[in-house]
Amino acid sequence: MKILVSLFTFLTVLFYCNSSYAHALWIESAPYGTVNQSHEVKVYYGEYVTNERDDIAKWYSDVKDFKLLVHVPGKAPVQVQLTNKGDHFAGSFQPTEQGTYFLSVVKAPKDLGGQTKYEFSSLMPVIVGKPGNLDYSAVKNPLQVELLNSINAKKGASLKAKITSAGNVVPNAKVSVFSSTGWGKEFVADANGVVTFEALWSGPYVLEASTFVEKAGEHEGKPYASSWQGSTTFLQVK
């Protein structure tokens, strides 16, 4: 069976080839952890759908200076120490109790892309102990993708995600769904910020929500005319 890449993905890749700052930043980690056992985390920058993981030395502006936080249930976030592995950063944390942990990155590069301010972010849940409903209420990033029914995602299932900004839903948000097979497709969330898609293949997926606003402002002492946000999450389909 041939793997088809949607027209959107093709055009997106063409755009990214000419615009290094429009890549995505994403977190990869096992979705389940164990109490008192080290849990490994990796952070990449590039194009997931085409398996492009940029060398850190080539990351746009100061994106490499991001901070990875782990949101511990009922406690303040803790920064994860990272090591440069060439094409990604690697780190780990050790859960000390059961619950849902969230790995989070938010980074707005100091340099503008022309007249546009860019902001990259990623958020991923790690479940320790018995799985339950994912509660994102303690994390309110500027833009985030929240998994609604993907805890035990299986091939062929209909999956849902919600797009929020600082705790508020983002209606009609554009959401790209990428599979490690090379398949990608763009969806539009409904009025409640919810997008639904079919898990056509087993394996890892990256979801990326994006917003673009033509509104002037100032960032790092430089004026901009518009702003772009891109936020990802990572999930495994059995």
Image: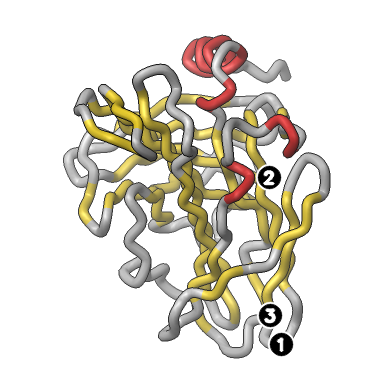
Q: Which mark is residue 94?
A: 3
Residue labelled with disc 2: 203
Q: Earlier in the sequence, mark 3 or mark 1?
A: 1
Q: Residue at x 57, y 33 (%)?
A: 61
Residue labelled with disc 1: 36
User: What secondary structure is found at the residue carrying circle 3?
Assistant: loop
Mark 2 and mark 1 in contact? Answer it, CB < 8 Å: no
Screen quadrant of the N terminus? top right
Report how far apart the C-alphas of labels 3 and 1 lie in the structure. 6 Å
Image coordinates of residue 98 in percent, x first then y, are: 56, 86
Crowding near the residue tagged with mark 3, few <14, some 14–19, many ≥20 C-alpha atoms within 10 Å? few
Crowding near the residue tagged with mark 1, few <14, some 14–19, many ≥20 C-alpha atoms within 10 Å? few
Mark 3 and mark 1 in contact? Answer it, CB < 8 Å: yes
Q: Amino acid at mark 1?
A: Asn
Crowding near the residue tagged with mark 2, few <14, some 14–19, many ≥20 C-alpha atoms within 10 Å? some
Q: Is residue 182 visible?
A: yes
Q: Which mark is residue 63?
A: none
Q: Earlier in the sequence, mark 3 or mark 2?
A: 3
User: What secondary structure is found at the residue carrying circle 1?
Assistant: loop
Report how far apart the C-alphas of labels 2 and 1 lie in the structure. 27 Å
User: What secondary structure is found at the residue carrying circle 2?
Assistant: strand
Image coordinates of residue 205 in percent, x first then y, are: 59, 42
Image coordinates of residue 25 in percent, x first then y, are: 57, 41
Residue 182: name its quadrant.
top right
Answer above or below: position of 113 versus 39. above
Q: Amino acid at mark 2?
A: Gly
Q: Residue at x 23, y 33 (%)?
A: 217
Number of residue marks: 3
Answer above or below: position of 13 versus 151. above
The colour scheme used here is: secondary structure
> Residue lying furthest right in this view?
85
